[in-house]
Image (cartoon, helix red, strand yellow):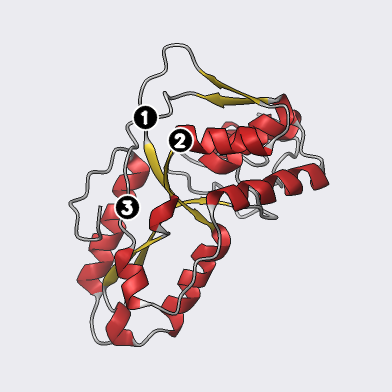
């Protein structure tokens, strides 16, 4: 898939990405110059860690349970990119001449990091001593199955070097999880999983059905006990 490929979003999240690009493109003019960075699936250690993305997730499960568990059959393809390399691409765009990036889309990642989910799982198993690989009974292919062409980014920015590969990123995650004592309880809490956190805020009445805040008070930090409203 190049930047010119037709859009076929399979989730509401993907649909909003398409709508945002199309709407912003209509506003592009001499005084407004948008650029669209279509990042591959992110991974990497962070102070605001997310465990609901595939590399971070599989590595955390392996380290805290000793098992790499696949819910799909492992055949779908994923393009992957380290968060540090995403940041490098953002900086390159901000510093680029306008004529290179005005109303342009760029896939962000490296061609060699188009990998199948099974390959990710095997790399995680090899990086976490003693872990085993299993596939859920009756697992089928995931609808999110795609490979991405990153040639436009490389051709437009030949000086931009993306430095991380998937195995190196997995090793970084293993070391970070071990250093900070990541536990299975952390993994199953809302602290590092966005959807669980949203559901927690909805249940507490702090978000409405459109995910808008209901009051002006700051949200409690992830993991805080949220008391029910008194009526």
Q: Quadrant of residue 100?
A: bottom left
Q: Secondary structure at mark 3?
A: loop
Q: Is residue 158 above or below residue 177?
A: below
Q: Where, quadrant-wise, is the C terminus in this rendering? A: top right
Mark nearer the viewer, 1 or 2: 2
Classify mark 3: residues with Cα within 10 Å, few (<14), some (14-19) or many (20+). many
Mark 1–mark 2 CB contact (< 8 Å): yes
User: What is the C-alpha distance between the residues marked 1 and 2?
Assistant: 10 Å
Whole-percent x, y for residue 30 in the image? 25, 87
Where residue 210 sits: x, y (%)?
A: 42, 43
Residue 53 seen from this side: no
Which labelled disc corresponds to residue 26? none
Query: Of callouts 3 and 2, which one flags the residue occurring earlier in the amino acid sequence?
Result: 2
Q: Viewer-proximal residue, 181 or 199?
A: 181
Q: Residue 104: percent from the left, percent from the top?
A: 27, 72
Q: Residue 142 — which label?
A: 1
Residue drawn at the location 43% of the way across and 28% of the way down: 74
Q: Residue at x 41, y 12 (%)?
A: 138
Mark 1 or 3, nearer chain start: 1
Q: Which residue is mark 2?
A: 117
- Tell me what residue is drawn at x 65 percent, y 31 percent: 61
Q: CA distance from mark 3 to mark 2?
A: 15 Å
Q: From the viewer's perspective, tell me whether residue 84 is left or right of residue 39.
A: right
Q: In the displayed structure, would residue 108 be above or below residue 123?
A: below
Real-space CA distance between mark 1 and mark 3, rounded to the nearest whole angstrom: 17 Å
Q: Which residue is drawn at the image coordinates 71% and 47% (left, top)?
A: 221
Give the residue number, with chain letter if any, for mark 3: 148
Q: Position of residue 188 (x, y in %)?
A: 67, 29
**Vertical placement of residue 54 versus 102, above or below:** above
Q: Quadrant of residue 189?
A: top right
């Amino acid at each position: 898939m190049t930047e010119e490929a037709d859009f076929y979003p399979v989730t509401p999240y993907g649909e909003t990405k398409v709508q945002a690009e199309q709407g912003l493109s209509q506003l592009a003019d001499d005084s407004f110059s948008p650029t669209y960075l279509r990042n591959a699936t992110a991974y990497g250690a962070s102070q605001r860690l997310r465990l609901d993305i595939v590399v971070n997730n599989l590595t955390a499960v392996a380290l805290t349970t000793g098992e790499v568990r696949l819910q799909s059959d492992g055949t779908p393809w994923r393009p992957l990119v380290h968060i540090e390399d995403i940041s490098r691409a953002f900086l390159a765009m901000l510093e680029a001449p306008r004529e290179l990036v005005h109303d342009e889309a760029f896939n962000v990642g490296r061609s060699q990091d188009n990998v199948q989910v099974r390959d990710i799982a095997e790399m995680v198993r090899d990086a976490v001593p003693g872990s085993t690989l299993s596939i859920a009974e009756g697992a089928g292919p995931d609808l999110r199955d795609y490979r991405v062409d990153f040639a436009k980014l490389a051709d437009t920015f030949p000086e931009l070097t993306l430095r991380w590969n998937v195995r190196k990123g997995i090793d970084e995650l293993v070391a970070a999880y071990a250093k900070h004592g990541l536990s299975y309880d952390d993994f199953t809490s809302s602290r590092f999983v966005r959807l669980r956190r949203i559901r927690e805020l909805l249940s507490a009445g702090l978000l409405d059905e459109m995910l808008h805040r209901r009051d002006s008070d700051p949200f409690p930090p992830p993991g805080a006990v949220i008391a029910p409203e008194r009526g």
